[in-house]
Amino acid sequence: MRELYSQLKQLFPLGELTEQRQDLAFVTVPQEHLRSLLLHLRDREGFTHLVLLTAVDWLEDNIFQLTYLLTNREQQRTLGLRVMLPRDAATMQSIHDIWPTAATYQRELREMFGIAFPDSPRVDEEFILEGWIDIPPYRRDFDTLKYAEENYSQRPGRVTHDPAEHMKQKLYPGGT
Amino acid sequence: MKEELQKRVIKGPDGVEFEVEPLRDYYCEAPPTVMPGAYIQIVEDLFNWARAESIWILGFGTGCGAIEMRPLMTPRFDAYRYGVQWRPTPRQANLLMISGYLSTKTLKRAIRSYEQMQSPKYVVGLGSCTINGGMYWDSYNTIKRLDDYLPVDLYIAGCMPRPEALLAGFQDMKKLIRAGKGEGANRYAENFDWYKANQKRVIHDWDMPDYSW
Amino acid sequence: MEFDWMKIPYALLTLFIVVNYGFLLNALIQKIAARVGRRYGIPIWQNYVDLIKNYGLRSSITHGAMFYLGPVFRLSGGVGLLLFVPAIYGSYMFSNLSFAGDLILALYFIFFGTLGMALGAGESGHPYAAIGVSRGLSQVTTSELPLALAVFSVALQYQTLSVTEIVAAQQGGILNWTLFTNPVAVAAAMLSFLGSMMRPPFDVVLAPQEIPIGPPTEYHSSYLALMQTNRAIFPVAKIVIYMNLFFGGASDWPTFFLKVFLIYLWSAFVGVVFPRFRVEQSIRWFLIWAVPLGILSILMV
């Protein structure tokens, strides 16, 4: 992995390499270099499989992190590319022409995080949610509990027993 | 609303133009009516006995409970010996099994399936998710109380209930039907406006007729 | 010819016996299939309960006139088939309305029910019904071919088109049965029999898993109950023809019950052993294996 990283480093401006395992590493890429790096990895380095494309909401830093996970089936190793996007009006170029499966992931991200992927096929159609009226639900500033309580009627009488508290009460009644 | 559901003018193959309004043309909109049982009590008792001994379930799995219903067809549990069968079409089914959590998207389909079933029809809620939301109590897209949206006859508690619990549930359901208490369809018809209001409160893009059968 | 009015109540009595026997037989065969899969199986009276329940449903909807007529046609196919062949050979009471050319009529009635079903299911407007009907018609057509060939072969062999006379020619010992005098025709007919019994490997028409139940997708309550009644009559009526043509007929009810059960068991036996054919596979199978046998049987006669 280190070898590959140093080769790539000469071609692209990359961030630090984070090695999770022998065969799994992550690296940060500037947004504008992602496309050429993906093509390079797919065509020259044998990373032919897009495992997944997902997003993380770093609310405190006001950024979205996109993760493109690629696998080289021959050498059995996986490389994750991270792209940091500004959270306000987040837009990313589509990669559906490199891997057609990416279009589905992009539809999901559009719906769940509100990240725009211009020109991706059917990206603006409803994917999982039907008739969603609030802000995208996977954003961390979306309050799930508040939404659930406003929209759905709860059955009264529901109580929660925290297992730790419950066992404490049972084993040491009245004690600490 | 989707494009194909909108009112529009269509030119037929013979050149005649006509107006199509899918929601009105393709569905019967008449609300359900209360259907009384047979006039003679003994006939109704016979029918209730037959209904209890021949429960046909609509094969419609909503949540994780769908996977718990499959063992019932296998040699170990074999629900067929109790007269319980699975039917693939709502027209022939009598029992709608809501097996587990129900997202609002699935609720829409479940309502339509329920309305296409023939009266008398029964609803059984499976697992704690249908009772009070279960582990999805704070989820943004699952309903918390099934009986707000469909007339539930019986709940089977558990997360998920084992097939043995389901078999016990079928026996309870049989007792209910034989006692003439399986009148969910009539309850649905009587409180139709209340059920519809509840359904429309959670389904934000209501793009079907109010009653589809 | 003087028509004997007394034949009508007698024919209805036959019908009554056959309906009940058909319900029990269907349940029994289902139970046997379940036992093969190590299940306990349905209670033997389950089909009666289902029937009462379906008649007892309170609501039913319709999709038009043909939707009503579909089950009626199907039922009349089964009843007609039964009424025009002699159930018990040599018995005045149970020879039904058989006449000189009844063999041709019987062949027609076998097809009639499927056609009626096609009309009714087409009217229901459900796409799965249309798929099921197209599968059903193509499969029934090919599975009828070897049967028709075998029947012609038998008719040539005995030089008659009357079922009664064919049965009469087979009396007097087991070796006089068509099974032994014309084995190739019987083989072709028995292969065709598999195709028309809606059991595996030829049950893709109903295919409960992929195209929900096929033609009767939209049928419910009383319509479905009519079709269930037919499902009890039709196999028995069809087996009666087979029994009369190939297995020496029956001269009393116990023989009748036993022979019908054994012939039905043949399709159940094949059904539990073999998985399902797709429709083009089954058509090819009939054309490659069964039809040449039928042609061969005609040539041999």
Image (cartoon, helix red, strand yellow):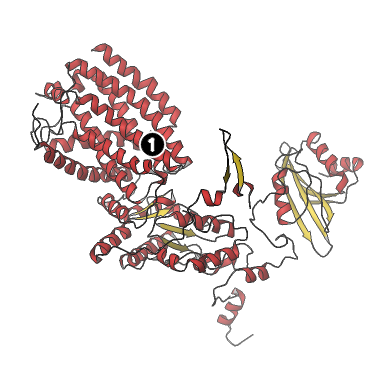
State the image coordinates of residue C248 (x, y, percent, origin top left).
15, 27
Left or right: C127 in relation to C3: right
Identify the residue shown where x is 32% and y is 22%: C146
Identify the residue shown where x is 36% and y is 21%: C289
State the image coordinates of residue B54 (x, y, percent, origin top left).
32, 55
Left or right: C97 in relation to B1: left
State the image coordinates of residue B190 (x, y, percent, origin top left).
44, 68
Identify the residue shown where x is 59% and y is 49%: B5
Mark count: 1
Q: Tag 1: Cα neighbours inside 10 Å, few (<14), some, or many (≥20)?
A: some
Judging by the rendered image, the residue that carries numbered circle 1 is: C119
Q: Quadrant of residue A60?
A: bottom right
State the image coordinates of residue A140 (x, y, percent, origin top left).
74, 64
Chain letter for the residue marked with disc 1 in the picture = C
| A87 versus A51 height, above or below | below
As shown in the figure, which amino acid type bears the numbered disc 1? Leu
Residue C126 visible in image = yes
Residue C246 visible in image = no
Secondary structure under tag 1 reads helix
- In the displayed image of the protein, which residue is found farthest to the front? B16
Identify the residue shown where x is 38% and y is 33%: C202
Nearer to the camera, C199 or A88: A88
Left or right: C168 in relation to C264: left
Left or right: A152 in relation to C28: right
| C172 versus B62 height, above or below | above
Nearer to the camera, A37 or B99: B99
| C38 versus B196 height, above or below | above
- In the displayed image of the protein, which residue is found farthest to the bottom? A174
